[in-house]
Image (cartoon, helix red, strand yellow):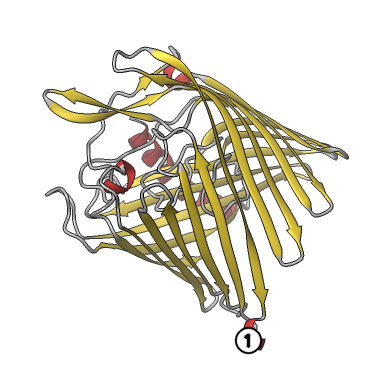
Amino acid sequence: MIKPILNTIICASILPGLVISNNVFALELTGKTGIEALGFFQDAKFPEQHSFYGSVAIEPELYQQIDDNSEIRAKLFYRYDANSTSRTHGDIRELMYYRYADDWEIHAGIGKVFWGTTESRHLVDTINQIDNIESLDDEQRLGQAILQAKFIRDWGTVDLFVLPGFREVDFGQSELRPNLGLSTTSDALYQSSDKDRHIDFAARWNHTLDDLDLGISYFNGTQRTPLLNPVLVNGQPKLQATYVQSQQLGVDAQYIADDLLVKFEGLHRASHKVANTGAFSEYDSNAFVLGGEYTLIGIAETAYDLGLIGEYLYDEWEETTPFQKDWFTGLRWVLNDEQSTEVLFGNIYDLDDGSQIWQLEASRRIAENWKAEVTGRWVTNVDTNNRFLNAYKQDDLVSIKLDYYF
């Protein structure tokens, strides 16, 4: 229901904004629009799926200064894909009012908040729900209704969040690639009787001490990652998303030691599991990512930098992630040229069963307003018991994007 509403809101918001910018409020309009070609190497699992998906997208950003201490920012998103109703979607990434003072701020509206330091997994990044349709690597997030108070002191910055409303993960329809391999039921199960109207709370303290950036966060509310339970609907196997109540205490840190960055994200969850009967039971778990990135600056007497990345991933809650005991190896090649060319090549190796995820990302600006991006992702040596990676075993892909920035 929320999808067509958002589509209408976004279309209605963009066009008037363009008119208003030339007449009354002098809004600043920036953003990007582009095309994407998404191709898959294996045969599709379902007849509704395709080997190629072509789409166009627009992501306008609007800025309006109200006075010296307040402003409004908006960031909208819409994609049209001729082969996929699931990929044809829109979202209000941001529609926020900001009020600034010397030592405090108020942010109110729909927005995105990022927490974290590590490369392979954003473990403590909790506020926003993942945009499963857009994310090939867990990077894209949906906008979240937020009331945020920020207090800036000598001993650190404290952010307090009230988060009304909750957005479910959109797993798409059967024509979407990649997908879980089983369709999901349309009715999610909630532990809270308030369902998607539950009001969540969060807080974070962060501070910089010389070469150390440290953050401590707390979240109390509806867990963003659902539990996926197999159910039968009219005799057909499906997955039902279950959203439990959770408290989460997280720590993120980054320490700079010359050319070495040491990174850590860790959390403790006081959450719940659900039985086949629908009964909920308390479940506590811990998870962390620890590693670093060492940069070889000016390799072979060139302008190029080469980053060597290694991270260990650990998570006790195996129903929610494939990363129980894994190792990430990455190479980041930065050319330091006028086109800001970068290449990131990574591999996640499952230390329990040997399954592997590979990913290649490359980007380069073309002329003054264009940018090209290439992303490839594939899995190898997938163990038959690794249900997460088996779901994507036939979905090795390459994505090519060309965006125009205005």
Expressed as whole percent of the image width and height from the top left, the position of residue 344 reads 50, 67
Taking the spot 63% from the left edge, 50% from the top edge, the residue there is 117
Number of callouts in the render? 1
Give residue 74's quadrant in the image: top right
What's the residue type where badge 1 is placed?
Ala
Q: Residue at x 37, y 41 (%)?
A: 7
At horizontal 31% and vertical 44% (from top left) the residue drawn is 386
- Above-or-below relation of 235 to 395: above
**55 shown above or below 271:** below
Q: Position of residue 181 (x, y in %)?
A: 23, 42
Determine the image quadrant of residue 280.
top left
Determine if residue 139 is in view.
Answer: no
User: Which residue is at the front of the view, 134 or 2?
Assistant: 134
Look at the numbered disc 1 and give the secondary structure of its residue: helix
Is residue 358 visible to us here? Answer: yes
Mark 1, residue position:
300
Residue 96 drawn at (x, y percent): 61, 39
From the top left corner, tell me how far across and down residue 220 is, in percent: 58, 23
Please indicate whether residue 270 sits to the left or right of residue 255 in the image: left
* Quadrant of residue 373 within the rendered picture: bottom left
